[in-house]
Image: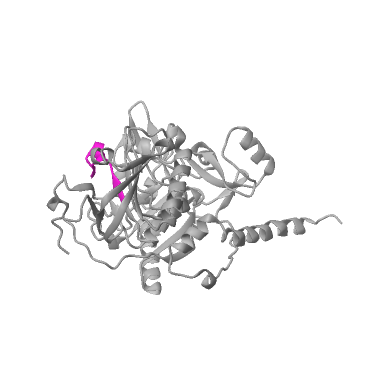
Amino acid sequence: MARTSTDRNLVRPIGAVKEVFASTYSDQARAYRNATAYRHDEEKMAVIIQPVYGRIRNGRIYPTFSGVARSHNYYPYGGCGPEDGVCMVALGLGRFLVAGEGGIRFCPQRPQSLPEFSAVDDILQNAQRYFYALPLDEQKVKQHVADGATCFDPCQPCQYPIGEADSDGALHHLASTYLSADHRITDGVSRRGQRLVTFSNILKHGSFPLAPLVQQILRIGQEAMGCPVEVEFAVDLEDDLQKPQRLGLLQIRPMALSEAEIHLDLGNFDPALALCQSNRALGNGRMSDIQDILFIDPSDFDRSSSHSTAQQISQLNAQLKAQQRPYLLVGPGRWGSQDPWLGIGVEWNDISHAKVLVETGFEGVRVTPSEGSHFFHNITSFRIGYFTVNPHTGEGSLDLAWLREQPQRELFPHGVQHIQLEQPLEVLLDGRAARGVILKRESSPYTS
């Protein structure tokens, strides 16, 4: 008997539920559970089926933009405090954010303050260049793949260039225009030129009350849960300002914070004593049990072999985990990046036994932390120290010379080095001020 369209439509969600159940036995899920205090037999699961939030535009469906917001900000700037929260937004489906591929980061208290979009060259370098949408026409999917686009399955989001969103009329609220002749950027899309996703009409001119809505959602969520929260949302806007504008709250969950209090003044530390200092450090507390370092030297890193480097790190992570030896992971670029030219694309299970991460910029690349991804949500939840430094621009410090001269080291393929120390490092993180220092020996001017 031939299947009806209803039967065929039922097969896919049933298959998706099975995949969700099977995913609990994956390496990623096992690593996540092992890092928590919960027992495997205590775990429970629920599957929620939600419609895709957005509208159909030229054979694909996506919201105008998606966002991730947190009520506690580990990276305060411009006079904002940690309790003011932080929000990341991007055109299209939220996959762009949760995969750590970028987006615009702002404080809901001061939405017009965008340090990473403060100059024309900064905007040209950091602006979103593609977005994700769910294709609805399988023939278009096949043609899209034939044209070289990133798409794996008709039921999975596909990657599209920003120009497609411009053709769809989805950039009215989000984009600015680069005028190359004058090397300047104007708000809106009324002029011809390169479209840049800046959210200027929303964050600067208030065409949609995003910042106050995020503040209200975070406040209500935090009061209801009794702790800092993280939310995911999507917004669908019509070009016609007289038509409804909608914000959909997709998910809300607790955001784990350390209760330990550390007060750091980095000026009190002898530079010769500090392996790393950062004014952009995630986490809070004190650690003094790390005697192993996995180190990828920025000067030797081959970005074309990023995937192989991640595999080697994963193997060493498994060995150190089996030996119950927490370690410091130091490397160039953004950890967990899906773009091999921006960093090393490790997944959570690849580094699940690391206790502290350091990511450092290298020639031509200034590293910025990715707060919108689930990868970094795991780091936050499990209280892993996370340092971002860009020594070549004066943002923090990292003593590469000290790392390179350590005698107890083992070299592995793809630029990975394992360093074993005779004395443990001491890691101090001030979560209220987003400062951190890693000391080369226990003796220090720090007083608890």
Q: Position of residue 104 (x, y in %)?
A: 38, 47
Tell me where the magenta segment starts and ends, as one range. Answer: 387-400
Q: Name, please, the residue furthest toward the top.
A: 181
In the image, residue 347 sits, relative to residue 446, either above or below, namely above
Which of the 4 image quarters holds residue 211?
A: bottom left
Color scheme of the displayed model: one colour
Q: Is residue 173 visible?
A: no
Q: Position of residue 195 (x, y in %)?
A: 44, 36
**Residue shown at 46%/35% (left/top)?**
305
Q: Is residue 428 magenta?
A: no
Q: Quadrant of the C terminus?
A: bottom left
**Residue shown at 61%/43% (left/top)?**
152
Q: Looking at this view, is 81 or 213 the one in front? A: 81
Q: Position of residue 335 (x, y in %)?
A: 40, 46
Relative to residue 168, is residue 146 drawn left or right? right
Q: Is residue 167 visible?
A: yes
Relative to residue 178, is residue 394 drawn left or right? left
Number of numbered discs: 0
In the image, residue 36 sits, relative to residue 4, either above or below, namely below
Relative to residue 11, is residue 127 drawn left or right? left
Q: Quadrant of the N terminus?
A: bottom right
Q: Position of residue 196 (x, y in %)?
A: 41, 38
In the image, residue 69 sits, relative to residue 90, either above or below, namely below
Which of the 4 image quarters holds residue 272?
A: top left
